Amino acid sequence: MDIAKIRLLAPFMVEARTVAQVAEVTGYSHNALGYWVKRFVRLGILEEVGKDRPARYQAAAQEFLIDPSRVMPLDDMLEALYRPAWNRLLQGYTREHRRVSEDWYVLLKSTPGGLVTRQEVAAWQIDEPQAPSPALPLNDWGVIQLSREKARELTTRLSALMAEYFEEGAETPQDDLYVFHLGLTRDVPHE
């Protein structure tokens, strides 16, 4: 199975859904997703649930072990797994920035301590420097020096925070959807 298609299974693993419902969530066209659903049914990964129309499908099991190493190297596998989420995150950033302004600059500045920072600046902020900063989505990056023990501690704390909000869920059905990402990995030295 093409590893990029794995994400199509996730909605069906949560609950029985129609092709149209999953197409809306994944951004796949109804026809393209219909093809994959039929293929997953033939492979025994999905099964039709009930007799309702339109048909609803659910994963045949709670877990599947897939071995993509037979068809691709690790870096390609990770790219295929995570690229759709990165693209969705970037599309969200772009949409939110466009709500504020179509024109943006990047302000680079250094602190007396030698830290170089970058910040997005809307074109209108140049003419109105005293105006309040616009509300933008969180997108903080940094390189930090930590012991491996501290890095594990930070990972545990961030994961717990993320889990807390996932478990809490929406307050109302009208709440917006947010793409939520946390990451921490050892840095690759520049050569």
Image (tube, rainbow, N blue to C red):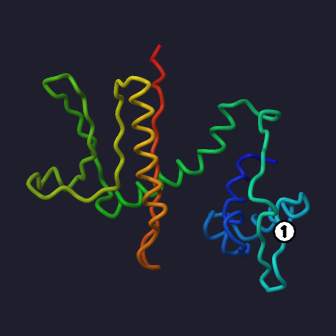
Q: Residue furthest right?
A: 42
The answer to whether residue 13 is left or right of residue 187 is right
Task: List x then y, in percent, for residue 23.
Answer: 67, 69
Q: Residue at x 47, y 57 (%)?
A: 179
Task: List x then y, in percent, for residue 148.
Answer: 44, 24
Q: Residue furthest top?
A: 191
Quarter of image, res 20? bottom right
Task: List x then y, in percent, for residue 25.
Answer: 61, 67
Check disc 1 and report the residue beneath it. 47
Q: Residue at x 41, y 45 (%)?
A: 158
The answer to whether residue 164 is left or right of residue 34 is left
**Figure label count:** 1
Q: Residue at x 71, y 66 (%)?
A: 12
- Asked if residue 150 is positioned above or below residue 86 in the image, the reply reads above
Q: Nearer the viewer, residue 129 or 158?
A: 158
Question: Which residue type carries mark 1?
Answer: Glu
- Asked if residue 131 is positioned above or below residue 4 in the image, the reply reads below
Quarter of image, res 189? top left
